[in-house]
């Protein structure tokens, strides 16, 4: 039986704000936001660990919420405000969570780190003084195979202390 | 003099790149005109390849297709042997074995094309168990399905067993475990007849890939270049398999004339790449009335999967570790790695030792019960001491005191008080708590004469600005190579750590410092880095550009003068066999490892007897690993290893059907999350090791050995259930609890 000819939908143009800049993505509506951001905007700090919403390596912030960009169709980004790991530091000035991860050994191979940092930053924006238990819950969607998480918890809690001392 | 950096928690060298998302992993790299590659794999575990059909409706003329006949050199992934083909040509020996390769610039199309290729395979009977393999139900590998067998003999086991007051027997098993690095495997290749083959990838051992590619393309060594990109975790999983992906990507690049990127998705990575060898261990142990172990008869078998890969070496480590850190006059270990039609099992952190240590430490808790001693008292009466010999006859020269280490671990965990209290509190509760421990050792570096054969080299170069460049093929994959090499080189030269750069491993530029495996990078290669750095200093001293009493500020000037006069300032150092280390490979006797790490791990668990769920509530990891170069990195190694051990013990269950992994997704293969890991308290005892850099030994694999048996020993303490197999999933534990209840009622 002859195969049906492959039918591809038309690409659409999606306007959004990414890391403080206006951006246009041109892609199939159901293409993954993960790929569009990595390939069209070169935001390769976003990682793919599983492609099915389990590992959190692809975590980004969309309108203030933490999402797995491997599960978000590009079309959904229309009008959205997006933050990726590339938008976490203020120029060369690292965010407290980034600095603490370096100081306290919260990153080993580093592949989970961008997603982990976004999850932690997102937590701190909603809850400035989390307990360790709250940190654990907030990071439960971000898998790390290297650290055993202990130093990630330490890093996040240390970042809180630094942020408090600063404010 | 600058402040020495060894012993301080210098922040990870490449930390800034990693926290900003700038670190470049292989999938972050793109080359102009690059195609995407895909692999067509056998769905069948064993069979004869009859044909390949390319389905209709796809523009096959636009696609690059590669089969075995396109291989310019030898169709094999050369490692220890050349039994594993790069692409199956006639016979298929395991499911997911690669048969056809495809490349195209459109990665959506390539996926469709992959599914449109049909392999016509005539099914042959396959074997999926150690017993069927040993019984030669089918002969699937050479004459007898045995990749390697080993035998360790010490004293007279049969006589000692005959005389022993107690003989305790037991059988233990461990399952396959997926490494589950969060970055899946991947490579980019460029290849043509003029320039040869270059690959960039996620890998642990650049020179393994180099060797495999040279044979595959029948090219001289200088025509092959392997570059390691930032690597998102390895744990052994990127030790041998990257040679396969590199080969596939390079064949597609060779045929298409375009760069080819090949990145596995998670499902393919889990189904097709190596896992920890499943194992079975049988113990027969003779003990005197007062708890002295007088005979250990151990039978250890690994399931190696369809091809040899590294099974003989995994077997070796598992065998040597099977008798643990105990003094016993009569030991017999018989072991073998056998072929089955599973995808080849391979390297995974611990490399055979977690399997045999699990069996031994579970078994000793059974022995203790039979003899009527507490588990710690049994160990106390049998720990090896300085001057005594291990199973392979190696005299322990280290000043280790395992009793002291055990007491330290008990103090930190409150072991004794908890053991009493939990026993009091458990009755009447559906949640049972328990505490258990395991004691173990782990040899650092290659086994026996392995390091002599490797003869690794590291190089240190100084620039005219007084900066130091460390060149080695040892890779950073999260464990801290860049940072500890910088610390070691900096201290050797009296410089700041920030003056040292560790060069990206690239076979065109770095010498072969051996594979990044076996907890050898710090201890063996670190020592070479230290000597090479001292060599640079020596050149400056000898030529009068530097005096011993000069401070570090004189260093840069001295380098400049030297380079102006003589050109490049470099020194290299090659591993030289130690006159004190003797190993007899034929009889498996002698100094198996230059040094050991020693550990006592304590786990506290709670078991919900209604759901069968086990949680690790608290964990203490006490170990002696020589001088600790970087406390934060070292503790991170232990914590991460313990978490993987928690997975090995309780969660990580590979489900096979007809030789295929069917739960090859993160949704149904469960690794520990942030909610599952206990607080982990890490304690280091430091006895400097004379042949390690600044006294350091190896550390990376150690934590995998002790974690699972400590946890399962705690489960037995909590529930009274004798568990002999990991992973201990809730279903298995519930069945065991039900069976125990029925027994009580009967
Ligand atoms: S890649 Fe998106 S959750 Fe794993
Ligand atoms: S640091 Fe490697 S996965 Fe988290």
Image (tube, coloured by chain):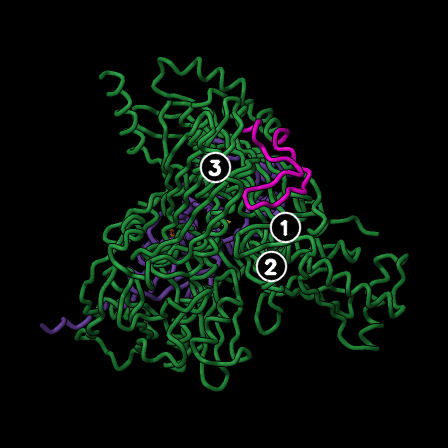
Chain colours: A purple, B green
Badge 2 local density, few (<14 within 10 Å), some, or many (20+)? many
Which mark is nearer the camera, 1 or 3? 3
Disc 3 CB within 8 Å of nearest ligand 2 atom: no
Residue B33 to residue B695: above or below:
below
Q: Residue at x 19, y 63 (%)?
A: B123
In the rendered image, residue A66, in percent from the top left (x then y), is placed at: 41, 45
Does the CB distance between marks 2 and 1 fall below 8 Å?
yes
Residue designated by label 3? B296
Residue A18 found in image quarter: bottom left
Residue A78 visible (yes or no): no
Does the CB distance between marks 2 and 3 fall below 8 Å?
no
Chain under numbered label 1: B
**Camera-side residue: A88 or B242?**
B242
> Secondary structure beneath disc 2?
helix
> Is the magenta region chiefly helix, strand or loop?
loop
Could you tell which of marks 2 and 3 lies nearer the N-terminus?
3
**Camera-side residue: B398 or A26?**
B398
Label 2 and label 3 in one chain: yes
In the rendered image, residue A72, in percent from the top left (x then y), is placed at: 33, 53
Disc 2 to disc 3, how far (Cα)? 29 Å
Tell whether B691 sits left or right of B394. Answer: right
Residue designated by label 1? B594
Residue B92 to residue A119: above or below:
below
Q: Which residues are magenta?
A: B379-405
Q: Which mark is residue B451?
A: 2
Residue B548 to residue B632: above or below:
below
Q: Residue at x 36, y 51 (%)?
A: B303
Residue B597 found in image quarter: top right
> Secondary structure beneath disc 3?
strand
């Amino acid at each position: 039986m002859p195969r049906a000819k492959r039918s591809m939908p038309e690409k659409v143009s999606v306007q959004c704000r990414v890391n403080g800049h206006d951006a246009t993505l041109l892609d199939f509506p159901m293409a993954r936001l993960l790929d569009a951001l990595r390939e069209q905007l070169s935001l390769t700090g976003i990682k793919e660990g599983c492609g099915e919403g389990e590992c959190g390596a692809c975590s980004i912030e969309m309108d203030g919420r933490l999402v797995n960009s491997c599960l978000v169709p590009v079309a959904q980004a229309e009008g959205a405000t997006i933050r990726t790991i590339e938008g976490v530091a203020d120029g060369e000035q690292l965010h407290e969570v980034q600095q603490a991860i370096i100081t306290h050994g919260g990153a080993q191979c580093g592949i989970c780190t961008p997603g982990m940092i976004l999850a932690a930053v997102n937590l701190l924006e909603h809850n400035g003084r989390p307990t360790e238990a709250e940190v654990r819950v907030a990071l439960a969607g971000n898998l790390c195979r290297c650290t055993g998480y202990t130093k990630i918890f330490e890093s996040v809690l240390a970042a809180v202390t630094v942020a408090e001392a600063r404010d | 003099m600058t402040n020495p950096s060894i012993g301080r928690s210098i922040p990870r060298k490449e930390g800034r790149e990693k926290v900003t998302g700038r670190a470049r992993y292989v999938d972050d790299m793109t080359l102009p005109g690059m195609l995407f590659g895909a692999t067509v794999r056998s769905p069948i575990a064993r069979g004869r390849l009859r044909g390949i059909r390319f389905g209709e409706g796809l523009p096959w003329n636009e696609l690059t297709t590669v089969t075995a006949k396109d291989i310019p050199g030898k169709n094999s992934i050369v490692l220890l042997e050349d039994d594993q083909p790069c692409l199956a040509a006639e016979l298929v020996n395991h499911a997911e074995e690669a048969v056809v390769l495809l490349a195209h610039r459109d990665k959506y199309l390539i996926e469709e094309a992959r599914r449109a290729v049909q392999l016509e395979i005539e099914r042959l009977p396959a074997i999926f168990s150690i017993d069927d393999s040993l019984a030669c139900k089918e002969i699937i590998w050479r004459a007898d399905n045995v990749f390697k067998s080993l035998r360790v003999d010490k004293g007279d086991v049969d006589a000692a067993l005959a005389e022993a007051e107690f003989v305790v027997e037991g059988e233990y098993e461990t399952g396959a475990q997926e490494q589950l690095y969060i970055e899946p495997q991947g490579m980019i290749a460029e290849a043509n007849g003029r320039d040869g083959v270059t690959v960039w990838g996620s890998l642990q051992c650049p020179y393994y890939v180099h060797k495999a590619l040279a044979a595959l393309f029948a090219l001289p060594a200088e025509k092959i270049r392997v570059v390691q990109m930032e690597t998102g975790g390895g744990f052994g999983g990127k030790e041998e398999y990257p040679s396969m992906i590199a080969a596939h990507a390079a064949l597609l690049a060779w045929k298409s004339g375009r760069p080819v990127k090949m990145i596995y998705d998670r499902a393919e990575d889990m189904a097709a790449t190596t896992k920890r060898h499943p194992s079975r261990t049988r113990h027969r142990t003779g003990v005197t009335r007062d708890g002295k172990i007088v005979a250990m008869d151990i039978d250890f078998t690994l399931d190696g999967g369809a091809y040899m890969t590294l099974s003989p070496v995994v077997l070796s480590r598992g065998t040597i570790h099977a008798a643990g850190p105990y003094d016993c006059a009569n030991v017999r270990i018989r072991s073998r790695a056998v072929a089955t039609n599973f995808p080849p099992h391979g390297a995974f952190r611990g490399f055979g030792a977690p399997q045999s240590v699990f069996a031994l430490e579970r078994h000793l808790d059974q022995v203790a019960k039979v003899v009527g001693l507490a588990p710690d008292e049994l160990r106390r009466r049998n720990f090896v001491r300085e001057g005594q010999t291990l199973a392979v006859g190696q005299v322990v020269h280290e000043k280790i005191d395992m009793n002291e280490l055990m007491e330290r671990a008990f103090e930190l965990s409150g072991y004794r008080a908890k053991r009493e209290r939990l026993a009091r509190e458990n009755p009447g509760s559906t949640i049972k708590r328990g505490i258990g421990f395991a004691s173990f050792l782990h040899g650092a570096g290659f086994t026996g004469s392995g390091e002599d054969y490797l003869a690794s080299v590291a190089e240190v170069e100084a620039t005219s600005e007084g900066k130091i460049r460390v060149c080695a093929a040892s890779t950073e994959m999260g464990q801290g190579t860049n940072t500890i090499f910088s610390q070691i080189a900096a201290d050797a030269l009296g410089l700041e750590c920030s003056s040292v750069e560790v060069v990206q491993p690239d076979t065109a530029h770095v010498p072969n410092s051996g594979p990044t495996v076996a907890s050898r990078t710090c201890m063996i290669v670190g020592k070479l880095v230290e000597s090479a750095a001292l060599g640079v200093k020596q050149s400056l001293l000898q030529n009068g550009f530097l005096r011993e009493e000069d401070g570090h500020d004189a260093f840069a000037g001295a380098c400049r003068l030297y380079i102006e006069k003589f050109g490049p300032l470099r020194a290299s150092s090659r591993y030289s066999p130690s006159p004190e280390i003797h190993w007899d490979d034929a009889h498996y006797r002698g100094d198996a490892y230059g040094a050991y790490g020693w550990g006592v791990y304590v786990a506290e668990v709670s078991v919900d007897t209604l759901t069968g769920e086990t949680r690790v509530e608290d964990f203490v990891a006490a170990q002696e690993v020589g001088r600790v170069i970087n406390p934060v990195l070292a503790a991170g190694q232990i914590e991460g290893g313990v978490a993987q051990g928690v997975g090995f013990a309780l969660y990580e269950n590979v489900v096979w059907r007809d030789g295929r992994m069917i739960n090859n997704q993160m949704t149904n293969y469960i690794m520990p999350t942030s909610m599952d890991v206990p607080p982990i308290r890490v304690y280091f005892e430091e006895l400097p090791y004379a042949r390690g850099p600044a006294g350091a030994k190896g550390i990376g694999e150690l934590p995998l050995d002790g974690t699972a048996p400590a946890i399962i020993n705690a489960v037995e303490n909590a529930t009274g259930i004798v568990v002999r197999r990991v992973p201990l999933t809730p279903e298995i534990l519930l069945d065991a609890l039900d069976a125990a209840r029925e027994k009580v009622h009967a």
